[in-house]
Image (cartoon, rainbow, N blue to C red):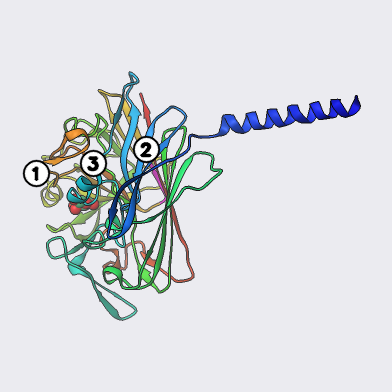
Amino acid sequence: MKKLNLLLILLSLVVIFSGCNQSKKHAPVKKELYGTYKGGEVYLLTLTNKAGNLLKLTNFGARITWLEVPDKEGNKDNITFGFDTFDEMIAGDRYFGAVVGRYANRIAKGKFTLDGVEYTLPINNGPNSLHGGPDGWHSVVWNTEIPEKTEFSTVKFTYMSPDMEAGYPGNMNVEATYTWTDNNEIIIDYAVTTGKKTVFNITNHAYFNLHGAGNGDILDHQLVIKASKFVAVDTFLIPTGELRPVAGTPFDFTTPHTVGERVGENYDQIILGKGYDHTFVFDNNEEVDATVYEPVSGRFMEVISDQPGVQFYCGNFLKGIIGHGGKPYNYRSGLCLETGHYPDSPNHPDFPTTVLQPDETFRSRTIYRFSVK
Ligand code: GAL
């Protein structure tokens, strides 16, 4: 009899504990073959959170390719740029949702010097090198891991970037881990090491339109960036070295302003940038570094980062790209908030350093959080 009681107690404990685990368990990550590229398999990975909201990723460029969240009425829509098929993705814009490296943003004339050695990079943007050259991390096939026993759906992409890839020294091991939480947060964790002293700058290049991707422009989006200064640039979007105070300029987003309100102003940096295409220097004295609110849908996005700045780009070069569901991504129909270091830092010793040493691990986190109000 005693034995039976003990057995019953043990059995109920097993039931209770497995029940607890059950309620904590997230939906499994769905992994489908999406295409092949230079002999590598490309997958489409679907992460579903507790509310049934979807984040889709692909290991081609470690990209975000779909983000489906509700508006204030509960209607769900995809709010990031991407393509229905892999063929369209490789034929389309290079950077939608991608992890960009080795150096996100521009390096003047594609040259920098490290310990007396001059390095030469591919030129792919006017006279400059942009986003790690034409075959940067946005266009390589990353390895895909789906870690088990995580609290939320998680995908880890890894890539070994060989010494002198795109002209940069050092074998680099790169990890970009995406977590899709029940609080509608995309958490991106980067971890990077190098075999030789090098420079690098990593970001995610997702475009957002809180009306829904392909549903008009982003000029009515209300933006806040907690930045008292921005990086002034020349006509090729290369920093002049000046960190200019935003006060009294169209770059003051310390209080909410729509993107469209001052984007047409006759102000030197607006003219040089053809709109907003500048790095804002985070004040870094609050948790949330930037927010975007779109009043029609009520969608609200928060950006949290440990990086020194963010490239706010309002889609000035977008033109006639056909994305998900045949919808057009036109001029200023999406905005990017690319967290990271300033452009051309290797040629500006007074900017925060982008040097990585062989005994260091670079770790950084950026969070995009979505809600409605
Ligand atoms: C942004 C950059 C823009 C444009 C875009 C890619 O990061 O600031 O000038 O090059 O990438 O189309």
Q: Which quarter of the image is occupied by the N terminus?
A: top right
Q: Which quarter of the image is occupied by the C terminus?
A: top left
* Mark 2 crowdedness (10 Å alpha carbons): few <14, some 14-19, many ≥20: many
Residue at x 27% of width, y 31% of height: 210
| Residue type beneath disc 2 | Leu
Q: Nearer the viewer, residue 229 or 357?
A: 357
Residue bearing the label numbered 2? 55
Residue bearing the label numbered 1? 266
Q: Nearer the viewer, mark 2 or mark 3?
A: 3
Does residue 53 appear left or right of residue 34 in this picture?
Answer: right
Residue 122, picture quadrant = bottom left
Mark toward the start of the polypeptide (2 vs 3)? 2
Q: Nearer the viewer, mark 3 or mark 1?
A: 3
The kind of secondary structure the magenta stretch mainly shows is strand
Q: Secondary structure at mark 1?
A: loop
| Residue type beneath disc 1 | Asn
Residue stretch in magenta: 302-306
Residue bearing the label numbered 3? 83
